[in-house]
Image: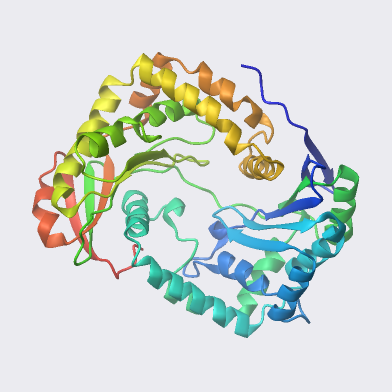
C-alpha cells in the first residue's frame, strides 16, 4: 500500500518549529500553540499548577476583563480552547482568514501578558472543585482514575493533572506567574497552522509576536520505567446502590518506540478494539453481561498501561470479572487467528482516513508526534505498517508484552456484595476497599 500523500510543510523561526497544513478551500485558519511544559512540572504538593495556570490565563490579558476578552473573540468570529496534558500546555483556536492577525495578537497577549487576576484564579479553583465533585458521579471515570493509581503507584504517569482541593489551595497568582516565567521560552514553543495560510504569513506572525522571547528550553524531569506490583491486585471503590459495576483491568502495555508496537496495535484490535471484537462478542453478544466491552493500548515514552473495561449488571460482577481474566489468558496464550488478524488489519488501514481527513486533524497529529520526539510526518505510513503485520509478529508481541498474571483490577460496586468473591479470583494477592468519596491519590 502506498503512503498517504499530503502537503505536510514545516518551517521554523528562531528555532521554534512551525507546522503547516495549507488548504485554501475555506477562508478559515486553525491555529495551535504548544508549550512543552505540562503537568509533569507541577511541584510535589501542588498538583494542578500547570492546568490552573493555563485555565486562568484564558480569562484574558492585562487590561482586559474576561467579558471583554470574550467579546473581542466573538467579534473576530473566533474560537479559542486550552488543554493541559502531562507534557504540554495547548492553546488552539479557529478564526476567519481576514481576522487572523488580530486573533493571533490576542492569543499572544494572553500567553505573554496574562492578567492572572486573583478573582479569576478563585473562580477556576471553584470550577475545578465542582468538576472533581461531579466526577464522583461518573463511575467509569472513578474506575479509570483508581486503576492507574493502583497499577502505577507513585509513578509520574499516575499523577493527576487536575490536582485535588488541598493542592489547589496552595497555588496563588505568584505561582502561576512563576510557572509562565520559567517555561515560556522559545525552545519550549511549537506552532501549527492549518487552512487558508501559507508559510510566509505563519513565519511572520510567529516572529512578530514570539521572536523576542528568551531562548532555551525547560529540562524535563526524568521518567523512570513503569513497573506493576507482582500478582493480581483488586481495589473496590465502594459506592452504594449500584445497579451496574464498571470494572477496569490494567497491565503494562507498550511504549512509543517499541519495535513491537504495530503488532500489538493489531492484536489489541482483535481482542477489544472494535464492536466485533472477541471481548465484546463474548461479554455482550453471547452472554448479555454488559452493553459493551473494549480494550485500549496506551503508549508513552515509557511503557503505558494496556486496559480492558466493561460495566456489567451488578448481579454479573464476579462472573464477568472471571470471564475477562479467562479471555485475557486465552488471548495471550493462544494468540489471534489469521482470519481475525486480516480483519483487524483491514479495519485499521481503512478507518485511518477518518483520523487524517481534515487539515486540522493532520496538524494535531503532527504536533502530537513532534512533542514526543517522533517523526511528525511518518503518520502517512501508518496504513502500510498495519497491513505489514504478520500473524507470528502479532502473537509473539502479545506473549512478550502482555502479562495476565500481573495486573490491577478496579471495580465500582457495593463492597460487601463482591469483596469475598473477588478475593477468590485466580491469582489475586490483595483486595482493598476505598470509599468512592476518597481520592484515588
Which residue is located at x 18 percent, y 50 percent? 430
Q: On the image, which quarter does residue 91 sit in?
A: bottom right
Which residue is located at x 40 percent, y 15 percent? 391
Q: Quadrant of the C terminus?
A: bottom left
Which residue is located at x 79 percent, y 36 percent? 9
Residue 53: x and y, percent? 61, 69
Q: Is residue 39 left or right of residue 315?
A: right
Please determine whether, in this image, residue 190 is positioned above or below residue 346.
Answer: below
**What number of labels is visible?**
0
Q: On the image, which quarter does residue 40 sit in?
A: bottom right
Which residue is located at x 53 percent, y 65 percent? 43
Residue 8 appears in view: yes
Direction bottom: furthest residue: 119
Residue 254: x and y, percent? 44, 35
Please determine whether, in this image, residue 94 is positioned above or below residue 307.
Answer: below
Residue 215: x and y, percent? 79, 55
Please determine whether, in this image, residue 179 is positioned above or below residue 398.
Answer: below
Amino acid at each position: 500500500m502506498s503512503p498517504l500523500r499530503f502537503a505536510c510543510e514545516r518551517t521554523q523561526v528562531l528555532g521554534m518549529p512551525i507546522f503547516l497544513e495549507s488548504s485554501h478551500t475555506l477562508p478559515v485558519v486553525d491555529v495551535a500553540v504548544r508549550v512543552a511544559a505540562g503537568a509533569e512540572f507541577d511541584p510535589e504538593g501542588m498538583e494542578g499548577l500547570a492546568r490552573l495556570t493555563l485555565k486562568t490565563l484564558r480569562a484574558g490579558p492585562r487590561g482586559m476583563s474576561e467579558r471583554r476578552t470574550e467579546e473581542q473573540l466573538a467579534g473576530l468570529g473566533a474560537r479559542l480552547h486550552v488543554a493541559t496534558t502531562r507534557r504540554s500546555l495547548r492553546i488552539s483556536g479557529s478564526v476567519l482568514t481576514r481576522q487572523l492577525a488580530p486573533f493571533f495578537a490576542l492569543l499572544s497577549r494572553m500567553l505573554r501578558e496574562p492578567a492572572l487576576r486573583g478573582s479569576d484564579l478563585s473562580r477556576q479553583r471553584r470550577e475545578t472543585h465542582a468538576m472533581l465533585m461531579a466526577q464522583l458521579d461518573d463511575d467509569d471515570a472513578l474506575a479509570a482514575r483508581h486503576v492507574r493509581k493502583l497499577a502505577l503507584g507513585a509513578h509520574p504517569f499516575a499523577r493527576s493533572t487536575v490536582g485535588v482541593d488541598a493542592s489547589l489551595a496552595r497555588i496563588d497568582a505568584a505561582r502561576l506567574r512563576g510557572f509562565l516565567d520559567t517555561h515560556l521560552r522559545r525552545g519550549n514553543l511549537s506552532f501549527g497552522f492549518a487552512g487558508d495560510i501559507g508559510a510566509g504569513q505563519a513565519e511572520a506572525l510567529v516572529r512578530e509576536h514570539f521572536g523576542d522571547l528568551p531562548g532555551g528550553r525547560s529540562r524535563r524531569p526524568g521518567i523512570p520505567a513503569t513497573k506493576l506490583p507482582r500478582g493480581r491486585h483488586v481495589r473496590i471503590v465502594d459506592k452504594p446502590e449500584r445497579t451496574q459495576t464498571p470494572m477496569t483491568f490494567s497491565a503494562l502495555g507498550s511504549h512509543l518506540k517499541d519495535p513491537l508496537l504495530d503488532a500489538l496495535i493489531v492484536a489489541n484490535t482483535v481482542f477489544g478494539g472494535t464492536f466485533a471484537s472477541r471481548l465484546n462478542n463474548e461479554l455482550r453478544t453471547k452472554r448479555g453481561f454488559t452493553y459493551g466491552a473494549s480494550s485500549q493500548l496506551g503508549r508513552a515514552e515509557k511503557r503505558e498501561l494496556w486496559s480492558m473495561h466493561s460495566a456489567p449488571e451488578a448481579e454479573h460482577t464476579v462472573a464477568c470479572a472471571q470471564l475477562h481474566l479467562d479471555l485475557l489468558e486465552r488471548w495471550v496464550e493462544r494468540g489471534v487467528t489469521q482470519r481475525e488478524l486480516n480483519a483487524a488489519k483491514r479495519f485499521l488501514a481503512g478507518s485511518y482516513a477518518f483520523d487524517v481527513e481534515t487539515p486540522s486533524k493532520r496538524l494535531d497529529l503532527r504536533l502530537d508526534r513532534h512533542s514526543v520526539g517522533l517523526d511528525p510526518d511518518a503518520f502517512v505510513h501508518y496504513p502500510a505498517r498495519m497491513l505489514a503485520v504478520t500473524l507470528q509478529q502479532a502473537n509473539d508481541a502479545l506473549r512478550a508484552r502482555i502479562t495476565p498474571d500481573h495486573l490491577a483490577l478496579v471495580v465500582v460496586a457495593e463492597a460487601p456484595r463482591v469483596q469475598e468473591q473477588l478475593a477468590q479470583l485466580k491469582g489475586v494477592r490483595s483486595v482493598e476497599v476505598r470509599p468512592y468519596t476518597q481520592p484515588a491519590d
